[in-house]
Image (spheres, grey):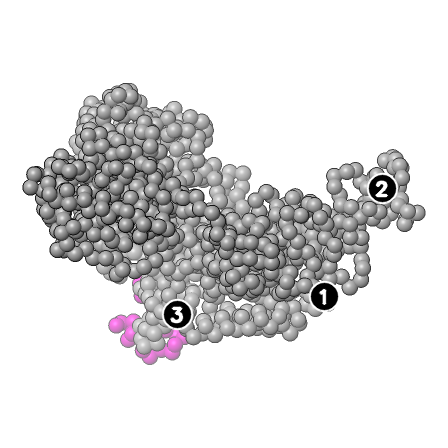
């Protein structure tokens, strides 16, 4: 109010504000955004400084955040500011950013290219300064555009101390473990110079960082010289040696516990994975049954908690752990309950603040010992593999590293007499990076929907976040009177779960006792599950066996755990505000007036300006402009046009972005649906039906009758899998399956004879759905004395004599109806396999051989000219497989019919057997590198010259493959040519490894329609459907595109091909000679005897 009174009688430019009010205005602008701030200032102009004034404070009073610059000195100030200890943990993580380049006028740098590294692996800052238009063109031609931003955070090991962003670099996510080790060496050394001790490095399971962490912790037999740990940093623990994979060290590695929990949850919920544990199996079917039996107030599970595709839902992990106690009511769910307890022990050994150090050690080593026993049992079982029936190697290695690191942490704090307040394992993961990413995404203004950002946008937000944290820290030190409710709430929570000194300082004997108790606990659980006998027989029981592969020098990388690649959705992007776009429009107008760019590009930027102006977005400026000129000169012939550097960068960008919804980017690609019908089509079982019924669909939890050879079994359905044409497993919809399709069924088995029904075991192999004979209704189950559900059936339940007649009726029903069922419902399905016979007295014999598909004759699909395509050819297209020469030939036949003036388009089987008869206006698809497709074209020559220009289009290679060079050279030979210049035209790169044939056909079709392929961005997800439609209509149409782009690249990779002017043959590897006058090459066998020591001229030059 005093500020309002003081400024009420002053003019706008004469108003003054206190330093505390300026800080308040700065926080207000950062939190609310420029539009909200401008509204407040307009209505309270005497109380708040102007928007321009606050923006000036942001960019003049605080140091800019620069890419590749590590802020070591600022970190030291941060630690002193918060009175934090000089013990820290360093974490790094990546986030997807918009793949684009922007010009920063404040530093005269193009931001968005990946910085080169020096010999120590450290980024070289300011590598992309701009002086001329050629500089920009050179950067776009030679440099790599970043698609990820890696941030490095430092977390002091004291509860309540905020984390600190040490630095940020752009990346294309193609670094190696050696690069990671170099970065850690640099960070550790620089912090040690300033007296800061790094206790551990943290990551989230990325394969490269995990490999580097294995080297750091000596979980490898080689490369130990690259580790920061040496013999001097080792911890002497002779009593614990029998349990340890390697020596303990002072510099630790910790894998984030939240990510471990989510990975283990996804492994359990994935439909194609079987997790056998002795006589039982861990399966999500038990969770679905639990949800069916009890209300949500009991189990607390949400529907999305059972979605295996959601890899960011840690709340689902917590819900599943809490519901595990209710699985005790399901006898065959022992393995599922054990698996959830395993997740609980692995993650809460670090995260639960109420745990004492002894409790933490007990939980993490119980999980480790159990996994060792379980893993060894899997290896000893013939039917199972580590890859398909165990948690991923990535996840297992993370748990082993965390167990060793926690043990090292406790012993190190004890030996060095550190205070118990430094024992904070719950902040040693990489969640500080995740918290930073959440803060950056939350900084969007009220009227903005943009939650992703480019590299320059990320640096701007980091800069504002640093300012915000600085002002908040001043509030904590009472340097001003600005109140932050979030900080006040945080102060109330500080101090929870404090560790006492006597609890931390455990003796070696106490630690030994804890690990021994954890081993006994793991043994008891293994024995209950039925794995102990096999382990005892193989002498793997006394001490949990340490896997030898854990110390191998193999880069661990599992598809399930891949955190370094998020699904990308390309859309149009706005990277400039309305003011900047107006400048771009002016520049493009001048380029269009000088005939340097076409009208399409001009209209594109005008349309983009209209959209931005409609949204009325206001953005921050990056500060004062550089003293360097903001303009560059573009030359085209005799014309010179000056445009802004920002415009030049905009012209070179492809303007692509990632999806704005990050939740979709971190989910797996949707699997092929097993059943196309809606859930409403599933037949509801009659509550009063007294005999089994045959249903078109069977659902998880159903009790079904299966007939395998002469055995009739009851099976409680747990899981489904779908088989492709070759018998390979595919993911399918989890809840139900159609009995007439190619499915396998996983069940808990109950054998039926004429007098008894008892549980055999939980199946560990899939049974062909063809053996399905019927489903028991609830009334049937009730009459079998199974109460209301078969899940309450004890393992050795024997049917009483009063059920004898009902058992006989089931037997009669199955045997009488089996023939009609087989004939009527399974006529088009797979053949019934011959599985291993089930025996009630031998649980181990209940494994059933997986079904193999029936080998059917390929049916005719489409006849194109005289080329017959079969249903197998259609299946290859529809199922995402690589195209064959049959598909390519069919496409070329259709193009040849539609465009008779086009040369080439000959069968690819003749590409090294038959030359082309004409070389003008050629379009030809070629098969290169044994398993790849490309296409080349030639232009029509105005005069019969002996030279030719060839354009080669490839969706993978930017340079001409050697096999492609040989093929093109052969095809063009014998056509009166002396040389040809092959240019590799940059076109859209394919996603994945199976669509090269699609892109070759698409580019050939575009060339036939006189469309330049380099200007097209195809809709890859629709290309296969489009190709099938073209074949069915017998007419090739241009493939669907997202949009067209403008190509400004002026230099291409070129290869010159030479042909002998006498025989017009290609350079086939035989010796050739060059005329010293016209520099034409001849086959030596085609000319007179040639002396290398002499000057030689051809007949034309003589």
Q: Is residue 231 left or right of residue 653?
A: left
Range covered by the magenta-colored residues: 1-22
- Residue 437 in view of the camera: no
Q: Secondary structure at mark 3?
A: helix
Residue at image location 51% in from the left, 49% down from the top: 882
Residue at image location 43% in from the left, 65% down from the top: 620
Residue 88, position in %: x, y? 33, 40
- Residue 1005 in view of the camera: yes
Q: Nearer the viewer, mark 2 or mark 3?
A: 2
**N-term mark: 1 or 3:** 3
Q: Secondary structure at mark 2?
A: helix
Residue 312, position in %: x, y? 32, 50
Other-residue count near label 1 (Cα within 10 Å), few / some / many at <14 / 14–19 / ≥20: few
- Residue at the spot of label 3: 51
Other-residue count near label 2 (Cα within 10 Å), few / some / many at <14 / 14–19 / ≥20: few
Q: Name the residue nearer the viewer: 166 or 385.
A: 385
- Residue at the spot of label 1: 637
Q: Nearer the viewer, mark 2 or mark 1?
A: 2
Residue 732, position in %: x, y? 34, 50
Which of the 4 quarters of the picture holds residue 238? top left
Was residue 12 drawn as part of the magenta stretch in this picture?
A: yes
The residues bearing labels 2 and 3 have C-alpha atoms spaced at a distance of: 81 Å
The residues bearing labels 1 and 3 have C-alpha atoms spaced at a distance of: 45 Å
The residues bearing labels 2 and 1 have C-alpha atoms spaced at a distance of: 43 Å
Residue at image location 24% in from the left, 37% down from the top: 711
- Residue at the spot of label 2: 1086
Residue at image location 43% in from the left, 35% down from the top: 555
Q: Is residue 484 left or right of residue 871?
A: left
Q: Secondary structure at mark 1?
A: loop
**N-term mark: 2 or 3:** 3
């Amino acid at each position: 109010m005093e500020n309002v009174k003081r400024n009420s009688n002053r003019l706008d430019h004469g108003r003054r504000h206190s330093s505390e009010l300026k800080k308040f205005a700065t926080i207000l602008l950062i939190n609310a955004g420029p539009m909200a701030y401008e509204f407040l200032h307009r209505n309270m102009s005497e109380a708040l400084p102007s928007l321009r004034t606050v923006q000036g404070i942001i960019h003049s009073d605080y140091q800019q955040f620069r890419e590749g610059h590590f802020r070591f000195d600022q970190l030291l100030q941060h630690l002193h500011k918060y009175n934090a200890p000089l013990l820290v943990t360093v974490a790094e993580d990546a986030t997807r950013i918009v793949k684009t380049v922007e010009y920063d006028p404040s530093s005269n740098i193009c931001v968005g290219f990946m910085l080169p590294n020096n010999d120590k692996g450290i980024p070289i800052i300011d590598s992309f300064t701009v002086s001329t238009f050629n500089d920009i063109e050179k950067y776009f031609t030679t440099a790599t555009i970043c698609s990820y931003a890696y941030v490095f955070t430092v977390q002091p090991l004291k509860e309540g101390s905020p984390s600190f962003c040490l630095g940020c670099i752009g990346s294309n996510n193609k670094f190696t473990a050696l690069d990671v080790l170099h970065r850690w060496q640099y960070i550790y050394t620089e912090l040690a110079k300033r007296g800061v001790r790094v206790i551990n490095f943290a990551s989230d399971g990325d394969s490269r960082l995990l490999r580097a962490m294995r080297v750091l912790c000596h979980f490898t037999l080689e490369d130990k010289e690259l580790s920061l740990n040496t013999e001097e940093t080792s911890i002497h623990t002779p009593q614990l040696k029998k349990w340890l994979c390697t020596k303990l060290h002072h510099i630790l590695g910790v894998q984030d516990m939240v990510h471990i929990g989510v990975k283990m949850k996804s492994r359990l919920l994935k439909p194609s994975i079987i997790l056998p544990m002795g006589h039982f199996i861990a399966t999500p079917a038990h969770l679905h049954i639990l949800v069916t039996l009890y209300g949500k107030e009991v189990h607390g599970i949400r529907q999305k908690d059972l979605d295996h595709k959601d890899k960011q839902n840690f709340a689902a992990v917590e819900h599943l752990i809490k519901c595990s106690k209710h699985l005790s009511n399901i006898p065959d769910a022992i393995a599922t309950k054990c698996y959830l307890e395993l997740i609980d022990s692995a993650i809460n050994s670090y995260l639960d603040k109420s745990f004492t150090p002894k409790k933490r050690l007990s939980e993490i080593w119980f999980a480790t010992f159990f996994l060792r026993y379980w893993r060894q049992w899997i290896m000893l079982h013939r039917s199972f593999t580590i890859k398909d029936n165990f948690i991923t190697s990535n996840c297992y290695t993370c748990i082993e590293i965390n167990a060793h690191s926690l043990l090292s942490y406790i012993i190190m704090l004890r030996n060095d007499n550190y205070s118990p307040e430094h024992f904070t394992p719950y902040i040693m993961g990489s969640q500080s990076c995740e918290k930073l990413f959440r803060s950056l995404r939350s900084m969007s203004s009220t009227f903005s929907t943009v939650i992703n950002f480019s590299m320059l946008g990320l640096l701007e937000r980091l800069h504002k976040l640093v300012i915000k944290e600085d002002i908040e820290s001043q509030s904590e030190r009472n340097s001003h009177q600005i109140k932050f409710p979030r900080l006040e709430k945080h102060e109330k929570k500080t101090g929870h779960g404090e560790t006492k000194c006597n609890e931390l300082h455990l003796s070696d004997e106490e630690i030994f006792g804890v690990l021994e108790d954890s081993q006994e606990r793991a043994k008891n659980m293994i024995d209950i599950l039925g794995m102990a006998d096999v382990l005892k027989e193989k002498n793997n029981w006394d001490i949990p066996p340490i896997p030898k592969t854990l110390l191998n020098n193999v880069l661990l990388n599992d598809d399930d755990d891949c955190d370094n690649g998020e699904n990308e959705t390309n859309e149009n992007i706005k990277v400039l505000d309305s003011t900047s776009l107006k400048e771009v429009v002016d520049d493009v107008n001048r380029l269009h007036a000088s005939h340097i760019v076409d009208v399409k590009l001009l209209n594109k930027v005008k349309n983009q300006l209209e959209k931005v102006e409609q949204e009325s977005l206001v953005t921050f400026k990056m500060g004062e402009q550089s003293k360097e000129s903001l303009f560059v000169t573009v030359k085209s012939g005799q014309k010179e046009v000056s445009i802004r550097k920002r415009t030049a960068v905009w012209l070179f960008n492809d303007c692509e972005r990632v999806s704005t919804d990050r939740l979709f980017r971190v989910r797996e690609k949707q699997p092929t649906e097993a059943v196309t019908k809606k859930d409403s089509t599933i037949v509801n079982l009659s509550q009063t039906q007294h005999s089994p019924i045959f249903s078109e669909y069977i659902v998880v939890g159903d009790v079904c009758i299966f007939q395998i050879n002469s055995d009739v079994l009851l099976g409680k359905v747990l899981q489904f899998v779908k088989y492709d044409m070759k018998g390979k497993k595919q993911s399918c919809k989890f809840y139900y399956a159609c009995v007439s399709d190619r499915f396998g069924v996983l069940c808990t088995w109950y054998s039926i004879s004429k007098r008894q029904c008892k549980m055999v075991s939980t199946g560990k192999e899939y049974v062909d759905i063809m053996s399905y004979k019927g489903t028991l209704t609830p009334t049937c189950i009730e009459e079998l004395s199974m109460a209301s559900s078969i899940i309450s059936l004890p393992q050795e339940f024997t049917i009483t004599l009063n059920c004898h007649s009902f058992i006989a009726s089931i037997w009669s029903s199955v045997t009488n109806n089996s023939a009609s069922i087989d004939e009527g419902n399974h006529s088009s399905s797979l053949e019934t396999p011959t599985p291993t016979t089930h025996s009630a007295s031998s649980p181990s014999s209940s494994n059933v051989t997986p079904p193999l598909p029936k080998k059917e004759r390929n049916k005719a699909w489409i006849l194109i000219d005289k080329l017959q395509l079969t249903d197998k050819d259609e299946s290859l297209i529809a199922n995402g497989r690589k195209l064959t020469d049959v598909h390519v030939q069919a496409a070329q036949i259709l193009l040849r019919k539609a465009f008779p003036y086009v040369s080439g388009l000959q069968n690819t089987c003749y590409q090294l057997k038959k030359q082309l008869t004409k070389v003008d206006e050629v379009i030809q698809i070629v098969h290169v590198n044994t398993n790849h497709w490309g296409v080349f074209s030639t232009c029509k020559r105005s005069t019969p010259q002996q030279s030719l220009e060839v354009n080669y289009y490839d969706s993978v290679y930017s340079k001409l493959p050697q096999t492609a060079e040989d093929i093109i050279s052969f095809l063009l030979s014998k056509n009166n040519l002396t040389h040809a210049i092959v240019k590799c035209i940059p076109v859209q790169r394919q996603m994945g490894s199976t669509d090269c044939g699609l892109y070759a056909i698409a580019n050939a079709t575009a060339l036939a329609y006189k469309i330049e392929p380099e200007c097209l961005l195809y809709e890859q997800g629709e290309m296969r459907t489009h190709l099938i439609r073209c074949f069915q209509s017998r007419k090739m149409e241009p493939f669907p595109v997202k949009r067209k782009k403008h190509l400004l690249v002026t230099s291409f990779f070129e290869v010159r091909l030479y042909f002998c002017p006498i025989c017009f043959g290609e350079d086939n590897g035989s010796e050739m000679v060059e005329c010293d006058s016209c520099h034409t090459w001849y086959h030596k066998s085609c000319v007179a005897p040639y002396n290398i020591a002499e000057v030689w001229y051809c007949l034309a030059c003589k």
